[in-house]
């Protein structure tokens, strides 16, 4: 199966339940959308992320009720530097969607979604530990992989692979 | 088993004791440390402390070529290395838009189900031993040895197989391999009867598992449980059926689901999965297609040794792949696979170079571990051991 070009026109993607639902309720939050390699990605404005997750979880037709994964990508040195990535799965409809939001390196703070899915707890701690992105409203934002007194955030691109010696 | 779930009065909380369980504890299945706040024998609060096995595999992946990451994926979960190989390879193949020949796909299904059997056997043996049934452990490891010999036959390694490569398989399966698998598959259902005979009706085992560490379907979904832990709570999800990959749509199998949500329900789900897996193995053996086991993509797949010795072009491709890797078109992919423990997901981001920009592993044990507090709080210390066994954690998968 050779690769087909990505679709980035929001109008062409409106039929996907997740995008349609978000455009209906919080139009201003949707910055961009992309359908590439059979996967839909929606770029969300950072202040709307918790709301967007809650809306998708409670959608009556196609509830994206399961948080598959939450992680981060560091695009250093370009800005906005951090890209927080949410993978949602709909258990009844077997659909997947990816939400993304970009954060500047100088203000790497985003609202926690632990109030929507308690399972975000460990994932957000992991992103905080390894990338240094802070989640407001997280019940226990502490390091999870690295020791508590560790300096730096290892998965940042400006952190050397061999570590500091 | 008495179930104490009423909140404790204020005065009682002052008597609470903080107890460390692990990281060196035989029943935590690795270096898992649990901080327990207990009131007598009852758990008031449970907090998992992890990270003792963190090796920074995700960071290491960013410094390697795409094909060099395959052996790293083995090291994540020592019980299902082939599932990890498969998830990573599928993700990169999706990024590349590679077509995999049918024989390689069927071999992947076959090996994957043998991996599931291997993993479930270790789980069953250790779980039963935690609950006091020593014999089952020995029986399970007897059969596991047979599965490991099969892995050794195809890949030369018992555990760190790296048998699946980007674009197909590392090698053709050797002569006599399918006969050996067939012999094993014919015998194995009888072995499962043997384990079930020792456990399923055993009053001691039932007392330790029925009604213990219960979790409702809503809680399991909200806390991110996956695999048999989720199916044991009555949620009917199996990615092999719901989002088929590598040709699973060609196989018939049932997805065992139980609604009780306790340790026993998760036990029944996994034991039933052993039987379903052996059914898939039989189907894969019966319908194994002929043909190549590697995709026709000379810039990605290493050439055969014979070709390298005779053809200049093959030698050049080999040299290029080894020294420079191959570049992958920019993009991102999240590939999820039903591993023995649940949804194993790889999120691979490419920036167009020969090294992955970001590889994130979504480990099923990491997700399942979050349910442990909900399962154990308000119950007895002895039940924690049953609960840990029932969610089947592998610490390498959690800490990465």
Image: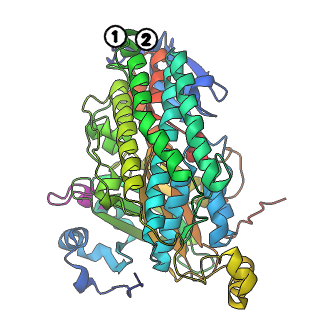
The residue positioned farthest toward the bottom in the image shown: B312
Q: Residue at x 56, y 46 (%)?
A: B397
Q: Is residue A33 left or right of residue A130?
A: left
Q: Residues within 10 Å of mark 1 (few under 14, many from 20)?
A: few
Ranked by sequence position, the earlier of labels 1 and 2 is 1
Q: Is residue B135 above or below residue A55?
A: above
Q: Residue B310: which numbered mark, if any? A: none
SS state under label 2: helix
Q: Residue at x 73, y 85 (%)?
A: B310
- Work out which quarter of the rendered image holds the N terminus of chain B and state it: top left
Which of the two discs, 1 and 2, sits closer to the camera? Answer: 1
Q: Nearer the viewer, residue A88 or A138?
A: A88
Q: Residues within 10 Å of mark 2 (few under 14, many from 20)?
A: few
Q: Measure the C-alpha gap from mark 1 to mark 2.
A: 22 Å
Can residue A83 be seen here? no
Residue B221: x and y in percent read: 31, 44
Q: Residue at x 32, y 35 (%)?
A: B232
Magenta region: A53-64
Q: Residue B11: which numbered mark, if any? A: 2
Can residue B234 be seen here? yes
The residue that mark 1 highlights is: B2
The chain letter for the residue carrying disc 2 is B
Are the two marked residues, 1 and 2, in contact with CB atoms closer than 8 angstroms? no
SS state under label 1: loop
């Amino acid at each position: 199966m050779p690769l087909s070009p990505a679709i980035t026109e929001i109008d062409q993607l409106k039929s996907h339940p997740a995008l349609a639902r978000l455009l209906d309720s919080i139009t201003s939050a949707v910055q961009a959308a992309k359908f590439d390699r059979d996967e839909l990605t929606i770029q969300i404005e950072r202040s709307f992320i918790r709301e967007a997750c809650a809306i998708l979880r409670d959608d009556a037709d196609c509830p994206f009720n399961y948080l598959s994964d939450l992680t981060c990508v560091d695009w250093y040195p370009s800005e906005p530097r951090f890209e927080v990535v949410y993978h949602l799965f709909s258990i009844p409809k077997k659909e997947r969607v990816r939400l993304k939001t970009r954060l500047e390196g100088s203000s790497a703070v985003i609202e926690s979604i632990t109030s929507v899915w308690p399972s975000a707890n460990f994932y957000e701690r992991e992103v905080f530990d390894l990338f240094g992105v802070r989640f407001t409203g997280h019940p226990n934002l502490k390091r999870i992989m690295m020791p508590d007194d560790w300096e730096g955030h290892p998965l940042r691109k400006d952190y050397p692979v061999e570590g500091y010696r | 088993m008495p179930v104490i779930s009423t909140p404790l009065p204020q005065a009682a909380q002052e008597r609470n004791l903080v107890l460390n369980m692990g990281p060196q504890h035989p029943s935590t299945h690795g270096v898992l440390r649990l901080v327990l706040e207990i009131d007598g024998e009852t758990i008031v609060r449970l907090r998992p402390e992890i990270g003792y096995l963190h090796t920074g595999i995700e960071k290491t992946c960013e410094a390697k070529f795409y094909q060099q990451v395959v052996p790293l994926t083995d090291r994540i979960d020592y019980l299902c290395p082939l599932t990890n190989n498969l998830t990573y390879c599928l993700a990169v193949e999706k990024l590349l838009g590679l077509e995999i020949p049918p024989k390689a796909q069927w071999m992947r299904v076959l090996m994957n189900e043998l991996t599931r059997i291997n993993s479930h056997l270790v789980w069953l043996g250790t779980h039963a031993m935690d609950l006091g049934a020593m014999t089952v452990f020995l029986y399970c490891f007897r059969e596991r040895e047979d599965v490991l010999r099969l892995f050794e036959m195809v890949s030369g390694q018992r555990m760190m197989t790296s048998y699946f490569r980007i674009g197909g398989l590392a090698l053709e399966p050797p002569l006599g391999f399918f006969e050996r698998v067939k012999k094993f598959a014919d015998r194995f259902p009888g072995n499962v009867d043997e384990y079930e005979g020792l456990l399923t009706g055993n009053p001691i085992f039932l007392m330790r598992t029925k009604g213990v560490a219960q979790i409702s379907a809503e809680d399991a979904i909200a806390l991110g449980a996956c695999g048999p832990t989720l199916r044991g709570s009555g949620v009917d999800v199996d990615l092999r059926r719901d989002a088929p990959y590598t040709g699973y749509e060609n196989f018939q199998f049932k997805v065992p689901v139980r609604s009780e949500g306790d340790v026993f329900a998760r036990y029944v789900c996994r034991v039933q999965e052993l039987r379903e897996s052996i059914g898939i193995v039989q189907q894969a053996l019966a319908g194994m297609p002929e043909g190549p086991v590697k995709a026709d993509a000379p810039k990605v797949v290493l050439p055969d040794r014979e070709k390298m010795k005779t053809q200049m072009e093959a030698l050049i491709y080999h040299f290029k792949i080894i020294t420079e890797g191959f570049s992958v078109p920019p993009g991102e992919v999240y590939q999820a696979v039903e591993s023995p423990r649940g949804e194993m997901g790889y999120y691979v981001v490419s920036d167009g170079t020969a090294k992955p920009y970001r590889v994130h592993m979504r480990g099923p044990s990491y997700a399942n571990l979050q349910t442990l507090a909900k399962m154990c709080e308000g119950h007895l210390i002895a039940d924690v051991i049953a609960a840990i066994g029932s969610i089947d954690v592998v610490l390498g998968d959690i800490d990465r």
